[in-house]
């Protein structure tokens, strides 16, 4: 599905379920990782995650579009558009939109754990990010840290 086809789909869903036109842009945002979609308050555009279409199909994408259109139309009308607002919850129920999208199975990548140890007291430290051993010292005895090994984990 291209961005133009997505734009057409969002406009059709808006007219079908909300009886109101969608006058802004909808597009796939490749930078979205953990969320199905995002309504932008400033520009009124809707970003969508293409991975949900690929993994769960069109029905899941339509549910995400309906959810984001609830934010859109309520915000345009000046009503409660946040998840906690009753206007939002009522509109979600009315158009049969999901409150949360399904989880992606591919979100967890191969992770690594870096092992450091202290040269004085032999205390070991596990970190996800590399640390500068010239700048940081052991929290227990202020000894010099030494990089030991990297462990790859399949999540």
Image (tube, rainbow, N blue to C red):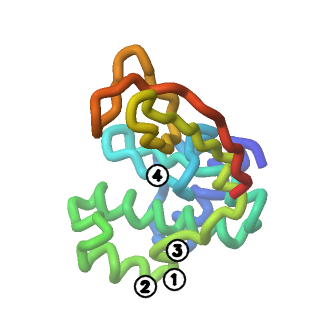
Q: Are discs 1 and 3 less than 8 Å apart at CB?
A: no
Q: Is residue 145 shown above or below 39?
A: above
| Residue at x 51%, y 29% (from the top left corner) | 130
List x then y, in percent, for residue 25: 52, 42
- Observer-side mark, 4 or 2, equals 4
Q: Are discs 1 and 2 less than 8 Å apart at CB?
A: yes
- Observer-side mark, 1 or 3, equals 1
Any mark on residue 17, and which?
A: 3
Any mark on residue 93, and which?
A: 2
Q: Which residue in the protein does label 4 denote? A: 38
SS at badge 3: helix
In the image, is 143 to the left or to the right of 99?
A: left
CA gap, disc 3 to disc 4?
19 Å
Q: Earlier in the sequence, mark 3 or mark 4?
A: 3
Q: Which residue in the protein does label 1 denote? A: 96
Q: Are discs 3 and 4 less than 8 Å apart at CB?
A: no
Question: Local crowd at mark 4 within 10 Å, few (<14), some, or many (≥20)?
Answer: many
SS at badge 2: helix
List x then y, in percent, for residue 87: 27, 76
| Residue at x 63%, y 42% (from the top left corner) | 112
Q: Are discs 2 and 3 less than 8 Å apart at CB?
A: no
List x then y, in percent, for residue 22: 48, 54
Q: Work out whether residue 148 or residue 34 is closer to the camera in this orientation and state it.
A: 148
Quadrant (top left/top right/bottom left/bottom right) for the C terminus: bottom right
Question: Local crowd at mark 2 within 10 Å, few (<14), some, or many (≥20)?
Answer: few
CA gap, disc 1 to disc 2?
5 Å
SS at badge 1: loop
CA gap, disc 1 to disc 3?
9 Å
Q: Work out whether residue 102 or residue 105 is closer to the camera in this orientation and state it.
A: 105
């Amino acid at each position: 599905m291209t961005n133009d086809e997505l734009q057409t789909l969002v406009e059709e869903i808006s007219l079908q379920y909300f009886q109101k036109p969608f006058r802004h842009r909808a597009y796939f945002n490749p930078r979205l990782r953990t969320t199905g979609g995002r309504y932008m308050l400033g520009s009124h555009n809707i970003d969508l995650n293409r991975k949900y279409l690929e993994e769960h199909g069109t029905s899941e994408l339509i549910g995400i579009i309906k959810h984001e259109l609830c934010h859109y139309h309520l915000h345009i009308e000046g009503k409660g558009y946040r998840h906690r607002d009753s206007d939002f919850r009522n509109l979600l129920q009315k158009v049969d939109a999901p409150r949360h999208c399904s989880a992606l199975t591919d979100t967890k990548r191969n992770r690594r754990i870096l092992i450091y140890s202290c040269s004085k007291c032999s205390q070991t430290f596990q970190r996800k990010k590399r640390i500068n051993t010239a700048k940081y010292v052991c929290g227990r005895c202020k000894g010099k840290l030494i990089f030991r090994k990297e462990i790859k984990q399949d999540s």
